Image (cartoon, rainbow, N blue to C red):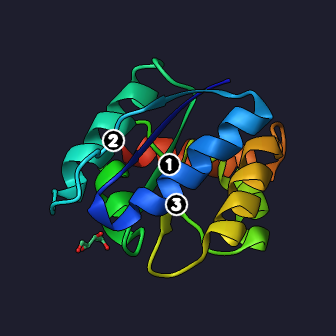
């Protein structure tokens, strides 16, 4: 599995922690930044990562900003992206099983690095319940992309 990770200035700490976790898990990843300590615009990084997932250049993406909210809103504008804003382990598992989320967003001002690591691990390891009622629902989400 190939992962892309990205953050704005508000999410650098957790993004680095996730990179360490992915190294430990021997999961291949591409770190798209940011590498600066000055203020950057989270939509730029959400878009960069989301487009790589949408194009199939990465299987999944993980985004971090101050709250995770801006990153998730921006990523979900890209066709084919189902980005889940998650701050607990129950939701990390549920969004994989039920929503087949292909991107994860978290907020560094909301949770600590330990919980973020647990969330990422569960989110990466939990399969989608394909062939279930959830598949039909995810297909309905995809149909909305063709309405507008
Ligand atoms: C940056 O200050 C902050 O707005 C950003 O990291 C994020 O929380 C946006 O949703």
Give percent across and percent down for residue 3.
Answer: 56, 31
Q: Secondary structure at mark 2?
A: loop
Mark 2 C-beta closer than 8 Å to ligand 1? no
Residue visible at 44% across and 80% down in the picture: 109
Give percent across and percent down for residue 95.
Answer: 68, 58
Q: Relative to 90, say whether 58 is above or below.
A: above
Give percent across and percent down for residue 133.
Answer: 79, 51
Residue density around tag 3, few if under 14, some if 14–19, many if 20 or more, within 10 Å: many
Upstream in the sequence, badge 3 or badge 1? 3
Q: Quadrant of residue 132?
A: top right
Position of 8 compared to 69: left or right?
A: left
Residue 95 visible within the image: no
Disc assigned to residue 33: 2
Residue visible at 28% across and 45% down in the picture: 35
Position of 50 compared to 47: left or right?
A: right
Q: Secondary structure at mark 3?
A: helix
Q: Alpha carbon of mark 2 to alpha carbon of mark 1: how far?
A: 21 Å
Q: Nearer the viewer, residue 132 or 34?
A: 34
Disc assigned to residue 82: 1
Q: Tell how many labels.
A: 3
Position of 12 compared to 42: left or right?
A: right
Quick check: marks 3 and 1 in contact, CB under 8 Å? no
What residue is disc 3 on?
Answer: 14
Q: Alpha carbon of mark 3 to alpha carbon of mark 1: how far?
A: 21 Å
Give percent across and percent down for residue 129.
Answer: 83, 44
């Amino acid at each position: 599995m190939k992962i892309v990770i990205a953050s704005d200035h508000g999410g650098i700490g957790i993004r680095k922690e996730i990179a360490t976790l992915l190294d430990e898990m021997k999961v291949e990843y591409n770190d798209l930044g940011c590498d600066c300590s000055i203020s950057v615009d989270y939509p730029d990084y959400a878009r960069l990562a989301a487009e790589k997932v949408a194009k199939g250049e990465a299987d999944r993406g993980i985004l971090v900003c101050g709250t995770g909210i801006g990153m998730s809103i921006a990523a979900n504008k890209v066709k084919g992206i189902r980005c889940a804003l998650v701050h607990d382990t129950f939701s990390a598992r549920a969004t994989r099983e039920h929503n087949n989320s292909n991107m994860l967003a978290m907020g560094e001002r909301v949770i600590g690095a330990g919980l973020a690591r647990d969330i990422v691990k569960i989110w990466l390891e939990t399969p989608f319940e394909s062939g279930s009622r959830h598949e039909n629902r995810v297909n309905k989400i995809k149909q909305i992309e063709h309405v507008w």
